[in-house]
Structures are given as C-alpha cells and as structure tokens.
Amino acid sequence: MSSPSEALMGGKTKVPSKKMGGKKKARATEEDARQLCSDALTEVFHRLPARTLASCRTVCKSWMSLLSDLHFVHEHLKRGQQKLLLFTNDRASDRSLATVLADANGHMYQLSRPAASRSLFVHNSCNGLLCLGDSRGAVELLNPTTGESLALPTPDYTAGSSQFSSCNWHSLGFCPSTREHKVAHFYPGDLGSVKACCEVFTIGGRAWRQVGSLDGTPIDRGMHVNGTVYYLTMFRYVASSRINCLDLESEKFDVMRLPLRKTYGGHCSLSELEGRLCLLVVDGTLDGLPRTMDILMLDNDDKKSWTHRYHISLPLLMQSCYFTPKNALFHDGKIWVQLFAKSLYCYDPNSNSEELEIACPESEFPFSTHTFVESIVPLRHHYFIK
C-alpha cells in the first residue's frame, strides 16, 4: 500500500538525484573554503601594522567591514607595541607634525595630520587616539594613523584657557568594562575655593556631564592607566602628598597617598611604564649638586604598594631650562625621557652606567612626548566604540 505522498506522486517515491546532491556538496565546500579564506585573511590582518590596515580599508567594502569590526579593532590593538610619539607645531608651514620613535637607535617616521595646526597641543594619548587642545579651549580627537578626527563640543568652562592653564587640562581615557572612551576635564571651582570641578564627555554622547569635585588643584594633565585617571594636586600653591583618582566606569573619585621618599623637596610627576602607574621623583638642587630621578611603580593589585624600579642620574643642564621629566617610556629595552624642549634622552637598565644619554639630534622645533600605540580605532561620526 502506497503512502499518501507516494499516491500524490503517482505511486512512485522521488529520490534526490546525484546531480542535486553534488550541487549541495559543492556549495558546502565553497562555503567552507570561503570561511577558511576569511579566517586566514583575518590572521594576516592581525599581523599587519595599523598604518597598512588604514590603507587596506579603502580596497573594498568587505575589507572595510572586517577592519571596522569592534572585536577585530580591539584584538589588533592588544597586539600593538607601545612607542613614543613626538608632537610639534611647524609654525613656518602652519602644520602639526606627529613623529613616532621607531627603534632604540633613534630612527623615526612621520604620521599624517590632515589639518592646519592652529597652535594645537596634545593633552594625552589613549588607544592610538590623541586628545588635542588649543588656546581657545576647543577639544579634538585625532587618530594620526588613519587621519580621522572628531571635534568635541566646547567644554562648559574654558575662560582664560591656555596650554599651561589648569582650566584647560583634559585627559582621554578608556573604560575596559564598557568599551567607552571618555574625556575628563578639570577646572577651578568658585573663587577662593580649594576644590576643582570635573566634567566628563563620553565619545558618542552629546554633552559634557558634571560628575563632582575634588580637593586641591590638579598640577598636571593627569595620567590614564587601566580605566583610571590619576592627578597630582596642590593646595594654595603647596604640593599635596596624595594622588586623586577618577574611575572612568563609576565616575567616582578616590584618593591615594604618595609613597615616602628621600626628600619632600623632590619634584614629582606621573607616568606609565609596562601598563602600570609610575611616580617619577627628581631629587637634588640646581646649584651644582647631583640630580637623580627615581622611578617607583604602583602595584596593580592593592593600589597601595609602590616598588622602586630604577635610579637614574640626570645630566647637568642649563639651570634655567631644567624641568621634571615627563612621560618616561620603556621601549626596546630602554627608558626614554624628555629633558629639554628639543632634546630626547634614554637610559639603558642593562648597562653599568646610571647616566641618561642623549638619544637623538636636537629637533628643529620644540616638541612634547607621549606614550603611543598605532591603532585603527575609528573616529567616524556614525561609528563609536561602545
């Protein structure tokens, strides 16, 4: 007795032809091969430098889609090597130059800058993005690797802004848990107050938000490490013995004590080495006595313990031009620091000498130094990392 389906088909069971089975098999094989090619291409892209990937984005839509994928961008960023970026304004040609230190021999290469300088300066760098400012108080993000830029709304407080004014100090940071980039802006409170107010802008948002205030006035632009912005502060022109912290996820403040050091007359600045917050302490005087720099690293687990890592002898330079080194960077086995506005020095921990040595010929223009990693983090208006 035939089944209903056999009756509808004239009592005969229709068997799939070998030809149809062959097409399905060929189609499946083609899909497997396509996926294999895609996986291989992704692995190749992971191994290419960000400068090359920026050009690869323009090849076709599929490559643009892959190289703009959130997961790929961050995985590629994790493999990036931290370098030293030198940022300067060429006033003769009215342009800003971003130059990257390529190796321990002092070789450098230049990144792109698509717009005129407008006397721009760099507040800080995070995930390959530069947070730029100017004398008007404007804030702009720039990815010098891809050439993309993004102008942020004007902060609520910009009166009397200048490169060295504490009311014009911003710090760009990244919150790993939410994958959001945020800019923190500190500015003075009410007249006569010892507090500083803080506003935060989330990249992809529309406006600055007031998040509170902290005791003391920031004396630097802050240092971003692992989702937290750290600031040294002072009270009525007296250096404080603590570090203020802003957690970018909770947007709450906390306080850390500075470690005990040999002399409280030493000048301090914050930096980052090997993904950890560092304190640079310069001791000595400008009247001919030896000057040294000690580098202490914060324990990432308890956020309280400091470990002494390096002791460096600073060269005797012109007293009127001396300042505390900023943005010490561990790169290619050496520590790089800037002492003069146009000079870069390095220290080799593996050598028998504790002296800093001149690393590169003096630059034609004054520059600022910043830790930097090349990335393809996009800054297009319709795409933000969330």
Image (cartoon, rainbow, N blue to C red):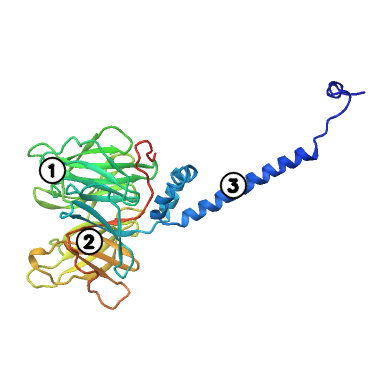
Q: Mark 3 points at which residue?
A: 35
The location of residue 159, given as percent across then percent down, is 11, 38
Q: Mark 1 points at which residue?
A: 161
Q: Is residue 185 above or below residue 300?
A: above
Per the model, the C-alpha gap separating discs 1 and 3 is 54 Å
Mark 3 and mark 1 in contact (Cβ < 8 Å)? Answer: no
Residue 241 horizontal side relative to residue 371, left or right? left
Q: Quick one: quadrant of the C terminus?
A: top left
Residue 15 horizontal side relative to residue 372, left or right? right
Per the model, the C-alpha gap separating discs 1 and 2 is 27 Å
Q: Residue at x 18, y 55 (%)?
A: 90
Which element is circle 2 on?
A: strand
Disc 1 versus disc 3: nearer the observer: 3
Q: Mark 2 points at which residue?
A: 280
Q: Residues within 10 Å of mark 2 (few under 14, many from 20)?
A: many
The location of residue 310, given as percent across then percent down, is 27, 68
Residue type, numbered disc 2? Leu
Residue 124 horizontal side relative to residue 316, left or right? right
Q: Quick one: quadrant of the N terminus?
A: top right
Residue type, numbered disc 1? Ser
Residue type, numbered disc 3? Gln
